[in-house]
Image: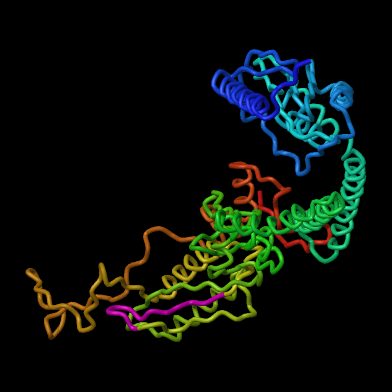
Amino acid sequence: MRQPQSHGYKLKLILSAMLLGFVYSLMTSTTGMAVEPDGKIAEARILTAPSSGELSPPSAKVDVNPIARDEEIRKRLQSVLDATDWFTDPQVQVGEGVVFLNGQVESDELRKWAGDLARNTQDVVAVANRLEVPEPSIWDFRQAWSGLLALWRDFIRVLPFFVFGLLILALTVGAAILTTRGTRVLLRRRIRTKLLRNVLAYGMGGLTILCGAYLILRVSGLMQLALTVVGGTGLIGLVVGIAFRDITENFLASIFLSIQRPFETGDLIEVSNVTGYVQQLNMRTTILATLDGNLAQIPNASVYKSNLSNFTTNANRREDFVVGIGYDDAINEAQEIALHVLAEHPAVLIIPEPLVLVDSLGKSTVDLRVYFWLNGREHSWLKVRSAVIRLVKRAFQKNGISMPDEAREIVFPQGVPVTVLDGKPADAHGAVRVSPHPAESRHEELDEVSTKAEAGLYSEAIVIEEQARQSKPLKDGDNLLPDASDPSVPQKIMKEPEP
């Protein structure tokens, strides 16, 4: 056989192989064609960029010789996703350690959970999460149902605390009732006012309920809410006190008046320029039956802060009036006549003794002021004063004591000169003496103690109270003063009207 040339032939073969390799590399880089292992040229694959949702952080470590195969990884992830039953048609594909997740899922949290699951699987290099979260339908009530189920689970979870709270609440209500009744019984002998006892008793009961509510919140773990309730109670009280300052002021004044009791039911008092008999003291006002038979309501704050005169605290009451006599009359004689009238009058008290004092010297009269005392519970000072003035006037007239009036009389002690046409002058000075004493009354006055016009001397308190009660009935339950029908309350002596 013929031997090939050694050196020149080998050189040509090397150059030909290099040329073929250059051409092959040029073709694959420019046309995108790939050469299969058997030397055939395959079509080039079209590359697409992944979406942002498919990307996942690359694995911190990529094994060159993986232990787990792609098929094993796929089966494992597929079985886990199917077992959860959270995904719709889940599909798992694995190639060269890269996991591709397809399907639908209800929420982004579950989508992220699936990606983290695949990423933490053994020998997984990367994860392409293609799971889709569909938009919910307007008729999809699954979220609402899930919320209801969550509420039900929360209710079941707190049910033991709820039952325990109901038990504590029942015990608290029972303790509040016992506290209210015990406080009412304890204060029955110390405070005679029924409504005031009820206010204090209900206040203690409310405090007991507040303590029970704090205990319930504390046991339930709502410590902050419990402190808020306790602190909010005082804040609410402050806000209410500022907003309803007048009402709060009257309420506190009613409590102080019911404790101090400067007057009782039926007392005749004068406060804020109003005179009347006390009918009721409630939580806001003091109700008086005026001497006109009307009901006057005075705010308790005004009653507490104003000057108050109680005419019934002391049964004896002093009255006075002024009477003028002529300058020619003896003052001591007029005083004795007036004292005799006072001594003979049945409604005038001997002790304290009556007085007749010179009050002033007027233009035409000497003014005497007559003082006398009477029992204000049994007699009306208006009627007694009227009767005494009438009897003193009658006594002065009978005894020749003049009572000139500067508005209608002028007294001439030396007489008035007059001219007589048909006779001589009455005296040497040519003047006629005119008696300073007035003529006797043409109508005879009665010496009776009480006339029909004065309608007796008894106190009109009963009549005024009856008229006030007819005008507007009162609610006895709101009265802070003791009931007059209570046997423990001392009764005032009232003289019934004479027929």
Residue stretch rendered in magenta on the structure: 361-372
Q: How many marks?
A: 0
Instruction: Name the one closer to the observer, 147 or 479.
Output: 147
Locate residue 53 relative to residue 370 in the image: left or right. right
Residue 101 screen position, x and y as percent: 75, 24
Reply above or below: 262 against 294: below
118 or 72, nearer to the observer:
72
Q: Is residue 483 visible?
A: no
Which of the 4 quarters of the picture holds residue 199? bottom right
Measuring from the top left, give residue 366's x and y in whole percent: 36, 81
Q: Is residue 336 visible?
A: yes
Whether the magenta-drawn stretch holds residue 369 is answered as: yes
- Looking at the image, which is closer to me, 119 or 417? 119
Residue at the farthest front position: 1
Decide if residue 311 is on the left or right side of residue 494: left
Q: Is residue 481 magenta?
A: no
Viewer-side residue, 125 vs 483: 125
183 vs 70: above or below: below
Q: Quadrant of the N terminus?
A: top right
Left or right: residue 2 compared with residue 65: left
Residue in the image at 81% along x and 37% along y: 64
Which residue is located at x 59 percent, y 70 percent?
345
The rendered magenta stretch, by its main secondary structure, is classed as strand
Residue at horizontal 69%, vertical 21%? 132
Q: Is residue 269 above or below residue 194?
A: below
What residue is drawn where x is 44% and y is 71%? 398
**Which percent across, then down, holds residue 26?**
56, 23
The quarter holding residue 205 reads bottom right
Residue 239 higher or lower than 354, as above or below: above
Q: How is the image coloured?
A: rainbow
Quarter assignment of residue 161: top right
Query: In the rendering, at what x and y percent does residue 283 appear?
Result: 65, 54
